[in-house]
Image (spheres, rainbow, N blue to C red):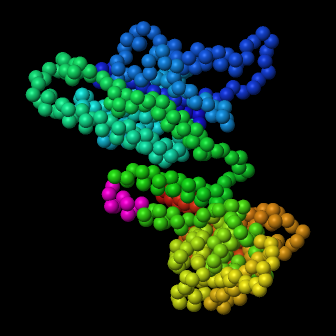
Amino acid sequence: MNALVALCHFCELHGPRTLFCTEAVHPPSPSPAQPGSAIPGDRDREGDREGEGLTMRANSSATQRADMCEGCRSLPASHPGFVSVDSETGIRYLSHQHPRQPQLFSVVRQACVRSLSCEVCPGREGPIFFGDEQHGFVFSHTFFIKDSLARGFQRWYSIVVVAMDRIYLINSWPFLLRHLRLTIQSLQNTALKVFDSEQCVCPQRAVRMNSAFSPAVFPHQRSGNAARSLTSLTQHQNLWASLHSSFSWLLKACGSRLTEKLLEGAPTEDTLVLIERQTEQEEEMSGWDGAEGGGSNSQSSQSENAQAKDFQFDDGRQEDLIGPKFKSLRHLRQVLGTTDFRQLTWHVLMGNQVIWRGADPGLIQSAFNVLKALLPVGCVRAVPYSPQYEEAYRCNFLGLSPDVPIPAHVSSSEFSVLVDVLNVERGCVIPVSDDDLLSLYQFNISSANTQPTDKGPTLLNKIEVALSNENLSVEVVSLCLLCLKEEWMNKVKVLFKFSKVDGRGKEDTQKVLALLGATGPGEEDNVRLLKFWMTGLSKLYKSHLMTAVRGGERTLSQ
């Protein structure tokens, strides 16, 4: 990650100061060596041997060294700093009191001053974001550390993450907030123990109330030590090495967490939904960390969030599943037969609840992994394997153990389908391949639905044509299915815009359906499929449409 993490402190004598910073140094790009010129890598290594290149020349003057007290200093000037090397990428993580480059020194200095003066959140503790294109963007988290000798019995610190990429830093907000809070809480808890022990020996509140107050000498009345180092406040001898490890890991993990991908055209709805789900999960985890001290209410909310998370689809990879499993849609069609496969696929596309009941969780998980490819990501809500029945509004894919009874209102409903997986009893033990599922299991499909599934929807007919064509490989069929889903998702977007956003009447909607090719044989199934797939549209797309419509209405009214 092209960023820098710094710990800052507001000194009572000298104001905002940078205590400790960690930066990532990428290996130099290989370039042809010029005759008579030194190799950049050798020059870097020579500089590293002279203190790992961490000494800040702009801060080495006698005047600046004299303008530092114990509270403003982390490492002595003779200390070479800390260096960690990522063996995979060759990136070095360097830590010292100041950045090694003069350009970064001024950027970090400004971020330090702003984080401890004007750019603070209500209460003076918590995260805030600020910055500009010229001086970089900053994620800052301010906090207090207990000190029995400080004014108000606490000192003010901040941890800043400085980067030039605003979008990347904003997208990393939940991740940075969650892990920086862990570091801050560790520092605060350690300092609190030292504070309590010092107060037991000599309570400072009583001493100050009984002593004469003089504003001129107030900073020097507390045992002559107005500025204590963070090491003294925490009694942690390896504090800076520990912070170096934490900051280095943060830069590495945050850099590998988000990766850039080349997209040909606009991102698909599946991509947008996955991004939204990842963001929601990170915000939930961040909320759990912030509610650790909230008692029973926080515990109940965590249990509810954890329970809700269980109903998200667990995208297990097929190769990770042990035992017999379905490998593809074509394999599933061969095992179930064309008639039962069409009936099952029809229920999947219509949004009905698909229940698999059997003793092999891996087999059921593989069936769900195959069937989910028929739907947009936003339409998939699955419980891979459960010891009890879950209602249809919570999941449309449900795996059950064989002894779980199906409620009467579900077995008699036309909006569900049950697949019972029974083990086949064999008289003699004969080695059987895992691919031969029919010799291992018997599949019984039942549903109260009496509507014929041979007419539509149109998408199902096209899927069956692709699966029945043996000249197409499994990979080609997967790409064909992806194209078909994108085609119908575009139809869903048009119908959503026309019916939900614009609020057109039934007659106009019928004309749009005819234009989209959703009328004719299987029209009822096509309309039902389109309405179900509307639930899979991303929140970003829906909000974009609503914003555009409101903006157009305001323009017309003006």
Residue 299 belongs to the span the image colors magenta: yes
Find residue 280 and report its horizontal and vertical position in percent: 51, 56
Q: Residue furthest front?
A: 428
Res 1 visible:
yes
Which quarter of the picture shows residue 47? top right
x%, y% of residue 3? 55, 33
Q: Nearer the viewer, residue 168 or 337?
A: 337
115 relative to 491 in the view: left or right: left
- Place of residue 413 in the rendered image (x, y in percent of width and height, measured from the top left): 57, 88
Magenta stretch contains residue 336: no
In the foreground, 134 or 20: 20
Q: Is residue 179 above or below residue 520?
A: above
Picture quarter containing residue 203? Answer: top left
Q: Is residue 368 visible?
A: no
Percent coordinates x, y for residue 358 in the rendering: 64, 79
Q: Mainly helix, strand or loop, the magenta region?
A: helix
Q: Which residues are magenta?
A: 294-302
Residue at image position (37%, 60%) is: 299
Nearer the observer, 302 or 280: 302
Q: Quadrant of the N terminus?
A: top right
The answer to whether 223 is drawn above or below residue 552 in the figure is: above
Identify the residue shown where x is 56% and y is 41%: 254
Q: In the displayed structure, would residue 292 be above or below residue 480?
A: above
Residue, x 32% and y 42% (percent of image)? 122
